[in-house]
Image (tube, grey):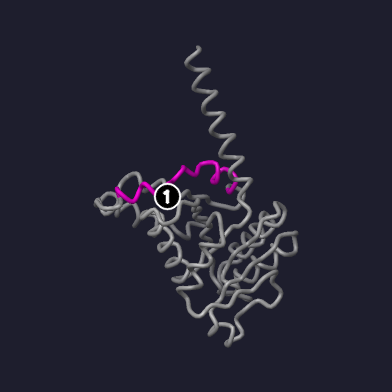
Amino acid sequence: MSLFCSAFGFHYFCTKRRKMEHEELKRICVFCGSSSQTDPLFAEEAQELGKWLGYRQKQLVYGAGNVGLMGVLADATLAHGGTVEGIIPQFMVDAGWHHEGLTRLIVTQDMHERKRLMSEHSEAIIAFPGGIGTAEELLEVLTWKQLGLITKPIIILNINGHFDALLQWLDLLIQGRFMRELHRDMWVVAKSVAELEDAFLKCQPWDKGVRKIAAI
C-alpha cells in the first residue's frame, strides 16, 4: 500500500509540475497552412485554437499570413484577448501576403531567418494542418530537437488524420533505425484543440544532452 501511495504521489507531483510548466508557456509558435480551399473543419479548429490561445493570454507566433488557416488563426487569437507576432520574409510582404493587424510584425530577409526567429521567439511549437511548408517547418524543428538545438515541447495537431502519413513515416524511420525509440518523446500527437491541455501534460522533458545519441 505504501509503495502504491508513493507511486501515486510521484505521478501526481510530476503531473502537477508539468501542468505548471505548461501554464508558464506564454509564447506559442504555430505552423499552419495558408490555403482557404481546405475542409471547413480545419478552419473551425483554427478558430478554436485562436480562442484557446486568446483566453489563456498566450502570444501566437506564426508566419504572418493574412489568408487561409493562418489568417483565421491570427484573427481568432486577437479577437479573444491574445497577442500575435507575425514573422514573414520581405518578398511575401511585397506580394501583399502579410496580415496588417497584428500586435507585432517582423520582416526578415528570407525564409531561413523567418523559421529561426519563429523558433527563437517561442516556448512551444504546434504543428497545425498545412501544406509542404508546414511539413518542412515541422521536420526542421524535429531535426533541431533531435540534435539538442532546441528542447521545447512540440505538439502535432493531427486533425482529421491530416498527419497520419507523416507519423507513419516517422514510425518507419524508428523501425529502420534511422532514429532511436527515445526520439518518439520529441513530439506528442493530439487529434483536436480540445486535447491540447492533455497533450502538453504528456510532453516529456528534453535536454541538450541528447545530442550524444543523435548518431545511430
In the image: residue 110, left or right of residue 216? right
Residue positioned 41% across, 46% down in the render: 185
Three-letter amino acid code at the position of disc 1: Met
x then y, percent, for residue 122: 56, 59
Residue 203 is covered by the magenta coloring: yes
Residue closer to the observer: 26 or 52: 26
Q: Residue furthest bottom?
A: 94
- Residue 170 visible? The answer is yes
x then y, percent, for residue 1: 50, 12
- Categorize mark 1 by other alpha carbons within 10 Å: few (<14), some (14-19), many (20+): many
Q: Main secondary structure of the magenta part?
A: helix
Residue 32 versus residue 187 in the image, above or below:
below
Where is mark 1, residue-wise?
Answer: 186
- Residue 165 visible? The answer is no
x then y, percent, for residue 183: 36, 48
Residue positioned 37% across, 46% down in the render: 209
Residue closer to the observer: 70 or 210: 210
Task: State which region is magenta.
Answer: 196-213
Residue positioned 54% across, 46% down in the render: 199
For residue 146, what is the image quadrant? Answer: bottom left
Residue 11 is covered by the magenta coloring: no
Residue positioned 30% across, 53% down in the render: 172
Residue 189 versus residue 17 in the image, above or below:
below
Residue closer to the observer: 4 or 72: 4
Assign a secondary structure to mark 1.
helix
How many numbered badges does the structure rendering display? 1
Residue 22 versus residue 129 in the image, above or below:
above
For residue 101, what is the image quadrant? Answer: bottom right
For residue 54, what is the image quadrant? Answer: bottom right
